[in-house]
Image: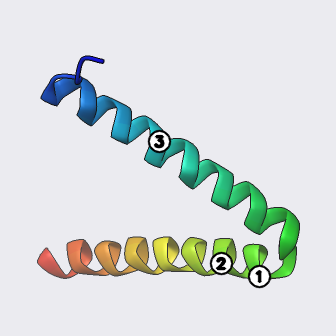
């Protein structure tokens, strides 16, 4: 059995982590949909708050 080169091994690890992440998200959505919705809502609120803070910063520059 030949060992994969460093680049090929990195690509394989990324694939495994990506598929593992997708599997975890799918499991979380089906096992705890209310908690998953709260997590998405929290992430969305964080993005909105960051955008608002950035807008306030840009407005205060002028």
Q: Position of residue 57 (x, y in %)?
A: 23, 79
Check residue 39 in the rendering and tell me which mark sits there, or answer none: 2
> Circle 1 is placed at which residue position?
35
Q: Tell me: residue 17, above or below residue 47.
A: above
Q: Residues within 10 Å of mark 2 (few under 14, many from 20)?
A: few
Of badges 1 and 3, nearer the viewer stands 3
Q: Tell me: residue 41, above or below residue 17.
A: below
First reached walking from the N terminus: tag 3 or tag 2 = 3
Mark 1–mark 2 Cα distance, whole angstroms, equals 6 Å
The structure residue drawn at horizontal position 85% and vertical position 80%, both measured from the top left corner, is: 34
The structure residue drawn at horizontal position 23% and vertical position 23%, both measured from the top left corner, is: 4
Most foreground residue, 12 or 1: 1
Q: Secondary structure at mark 3?
A: helix
Q: Position of residue 46 (x, y in %)?
A: 49, 79
Q: Is residue 29 left or right of residue 51?
A: right
Q: Secondary structure at mark 1?
A: helix
Q: Is residue 18 left or right of residue 3?
A: right
Please say if the residues under marks 1 and 2 sit with CB atoms less than 8 Å apart. yes
Most foreground residue, 52 or 1: 1
The structure residue drawn at horizontal position 76% and vertical position 61%, both measured from the top left corner, is: 27
Most foreground residue, 60 or 25: 25
Q: Position of residue 51 (x, y in %)?
A: 40, 70
Which residue in the rendered view is the most extreme toward the front? 1
Please say if the residues under marks 3 and 2 sit with CB atoms less than 8 Å apart. no
Q: Position of residue 21 (x, y in %)?
A: 55, 54
Mark 3–mark 2 Cα distance, whole angstroms, equals 24 Å
Quarter holding the C terminus is: bottom left
Quarter holding the N terminus is: top left
> Circle 3 is placed at which residue position?
16
Colouring method of the image: rainbow
Q: Secondary structure at mark 2?
A: helix
């Amino acid at each position: 059995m030949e060992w994969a080169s460093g680049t090929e091994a990195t690509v394989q690890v990324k694939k495994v982590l990506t598929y593992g992440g997708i599997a975890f998200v799918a499991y979380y959505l089906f096992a705890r949909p209310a908690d998953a919705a709260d997590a998405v809502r929290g992430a969305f609120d964080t993005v909105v708050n960051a955008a608002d803070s950035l807008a306030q910063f840009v407005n205060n520059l002028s």
